[in-house]
Amino acid sequence: MAFATQNVRRSAFGDLKVTAGDWTGNAGDANGTLNVEGGRVYHAEFSIQDGTTPSQYVPWTTSSVNPVAISVANRQTTTTGRFLVIHA
């Protein structure tokens, strides 16, 4: 199961944009990519919510402009992931 997103929603947050949804991925896969509109990411959170342990957060980086490519460095098999990105 390579990095994949589901139930993606896009909305406005004042004059900013929000992209949110679910994600899954396998440990050892190449970094996943999520593209969002605009030229700047103000906040991005990719969490793993598998099991009963507290949520874990996955590191990410950005590159390019319009769309912004967010690279997600998942290192754990994840079946219940959530993400929230605030961007402009």
Image (cartoon, helix red, strand yellow):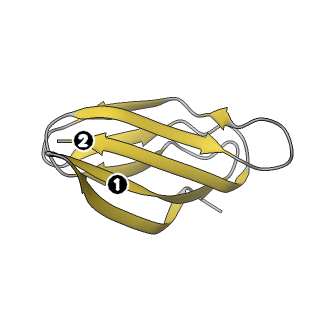
Density class for disc 1 (Cα within 10 Å; few <14, some 14-19, many ≥20) is many
| 46, above or below 8, in the image | above
Question: What is the tally of numbered marks visible in this picture?
Answer: 2
| Residue at the image point whose x is 60% and y is 40% from the top | 74
| Percent of width and height locating residue 48 | 67, 44
Earlier residue among tags 2 and 1: 1
| 21, above or below 63, in the image | below
| Residue at the image point whose x is 50% and y is 42% from the top | 31
For this view, does 74 lie left or right of residue 27? Answer: left
For this view, does 14 lie left or right of residue 75? Answer: left
For this view, does 58 lie left or right of residue 49? Answer: left
| Percent of width and height locating residue 6 | 51, 68
| 21, above or below 13, in the image | below
Residue farthest toward the bottom in the current orientation of the protein:
7
**Helix, strand or loop at mark 1:** strand
Question: Label 2 to label 1, Cα distance in Å?
Answer: 8 Å
Q: Which residue is mark 2?
A: 87
Q: Amino acid at mark 2?
A: His
